[in-house]
Image: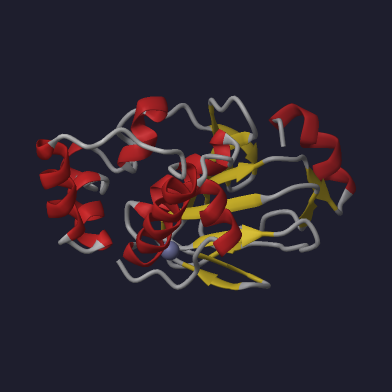
Amino acid sequence: MNCNHHPDDSTLLSYGACSLPDALAIVVACHLAVCDHCHGKVADAELIGHGLMEQEPMEPMSKKARDSMLALLDKSVDEVYSETQKIPHDQADGDIPEPLRPISGQWFSDLHWRTMAPGMKQFILPASRGKLRLLKIAPGTFMPSHGHSGSELTLVLKGSYSDELGRFSVGDVADVDPDITHQPVADTHEGCICLIATDGPLRFKGLVPRLLQPFFQL
Ligand SMILES: [Zn+2]
């Protein structure tokens, strides 16, 4: 899949080092399942990380282990990754991305969506660090303008939306810094489903969204 918007390199590095809060890590995992570009970057980062950790003196390798390691080195990182790590995105089993299914189930239509505002529904997913939610936005709906007190990662799973940062379609990730305020609008031809992870509360500009905030765990 050709994605136009990717997570920042710092986000990918943190993911490779297993230091992202799990809510954010799940969004990155869903993007990596469809983006070869970022997959390669994370694979490189992980190899460097493993190299740094393996500076300790090692026991001599068995012949079998050495042969399999040499075979592995003959392949490019991308090849190894596509064989061992890449998660198939099998639409026949459901329309929810594979990495999410253990906590969400298979189909968007089976989720108990909760209405937040006209044209906006959410489904909250479990996460031990950070907040993770699916958001379903009707065509042409404006989301409340908001800033952030932490990181926000948004992955488009269906449809598209636009905001001050550009247009985001299926597979695209918006990696939003705390200093950015934005107002996403779902594109008019079809609605939009996004997976959104935050590691700090949102900061709404308007009074009404601020009053509703505690009720929707935003
Ligand atoms: Zn990417």
Q: Is residue 86 visible?
A: yes
Residue 155 versus residue 40 in the image, above or below:
above
Q: Is residue 195 left or right of residue 129?
A: left
| Most foreground residue, 29 or 171 | 29
Q: Is residue 198 left or right of residue 95?
A: right
Q: Is residue 122 visible?
A: no
Q: Residue at x 58, y 48 (%)?
A: 119
Q: Is residue 65 left or right of residue 3?
A: left
Q: Is residue 4 left or right of residue 183?
A: left
Residue 195 versus residue 9 in the image, above or below:
above
Q: Position of residue 165 (x, y in %)?
A: 64, 72
| Most foreground residue, 77 or 87 | 77
Q: Position of residue 87 (x, y in %)?
A: 26, 45
Q: Position of residue 42 (x, y in %)?
A: 42, 56
Q: Residue at x 59, y 25 (%)?
A: 128
Hey, which residue is sitting farthest right in the picture? 207
Specify the quarter for ligand 1: bottom left
Residue 149 versus residue 61 in the image, above or below:
below
